[in-house]
Amino acid sequence: MKLPQNRVSGLHLATYVLIALILMFLDIRSGWLVSSRYIMQSALEPIQLALNLPSRAWRWSAEIFQERALLQEENKQLRAKNLALELETINFVGLLRDNTELRKLQDTSLKVTEHWLPAEIISVQENARSIRLRVNRGTQHGIFKAQTVIANGALLGQSISVGASSTEIILLSDWESAVPVQNIRTGVRTLAFGTGNSGTVSLPFLPFQTDIRAGDMLVTSGLGGVFPAGLPVARVSEVRRDGISPLVQVTAQTIANIDSDRIVAFIWLKPMRKLATP
């Protein structure tokens, strides 16, 4: 004889409730289910960790990118402050001169910059003879052709091709580059030419008997009106006299170095004041 379906379901429910009550009673009295729950929890922990891993990884990645963005912003601010300090150093470079002849240039070398604009290097083009770089500033930022560019507190080069939002800069070490310089120690003026090797210039027109030695600092002389007087340019690295040529062979290392800094600055010069005449 078959029982009605609803009675069978009720019997099953009653059986389950009875078993549950018995298990709860035994657990309360003896705690025998504690170890079972511990084992089940231990078995489920790896699954829970695996399920939580994507969300934890997302939060970790978000924190990393946020910290990186903050560090990049702080780095930009520090670079801007450093550029400002470098310009102050350039403005007061005349105060460091101890040569009588160079002191005559002090009036035109102090406070030569009117304002400046930092720019970031976006590409470097370098081959056997040419060393150019492109930065993220152009005519829409007020940049113009043949504008003076500095880096690390020293002359880097000048703009040669200016677009709306980017500018190509020719470096001092470019084969086509030349800048009038002056030896701070002796006051001797000459021309420094790019060698085509990154960071190196030569002084090919100095007579054999010229007083020049390794370590001498070269600054812009101001002749030609392209660059203001007093900008640090290079430091003499090698002086050779072979006894055959009537000229001394001099090479120097530029102070501005794009390998150590990806930020450069365009500077606007104040109108040059005429020296007072007696």
Image: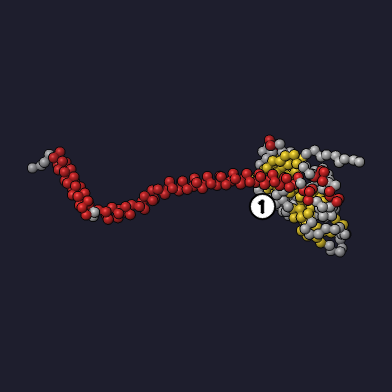
> For this view, does 240 lie left or right of residue 63?
right
Q: Is residue 163 visible?
A: no
Name above or below for residue 249 compared with residue 149: below
Q: How is the image coloured?
A: secondary structure
Q: Is residue 186 visible?
A: yes
Q: Residue at x 15, y 41 (%)?
A: 10
Picture quarter with the C terminus: top right
Q: Residue furthest left?
A: 1
Under mark 1, the amino acid is Ser
Q: Residue at x 66, y 50 (%)?
A: 261
Q: Residue furthest top?
A: 140
Give the secondary structure at mark 1. Answer: loop
Please provide percent x and percent y for residue 132: 71, 48
Residue 110, by quadrant, is top right
Picture quarter with the N terminus: top left
Please provide percent x and percent y for residue 208: 87, 59
Front residue of 114/8: it is 114
Please provide percent x and percent y for residue 34: 27, 54
- The total of numbered circles placed on residues is 1
Front residue of 271/94: it is 94
Please provide percent x and percent y for residue 213: 81, 59
> For this view, does 4 lie left or right of residue 124?
left
| Residue at numbered disc 1 | 260
Neighbour class for label 1 at 10 Å: few (<14), some, many (≥20)?
Answer: few
Q: Residue at x 85, y 47 (%)?
A: 104
Front residue of 146/114: it is 114
Q: Residue furthest right?
A: 278
> For this view, does 241 lie left or right of residue 256?
right
Front residue of 24/147: it is 24
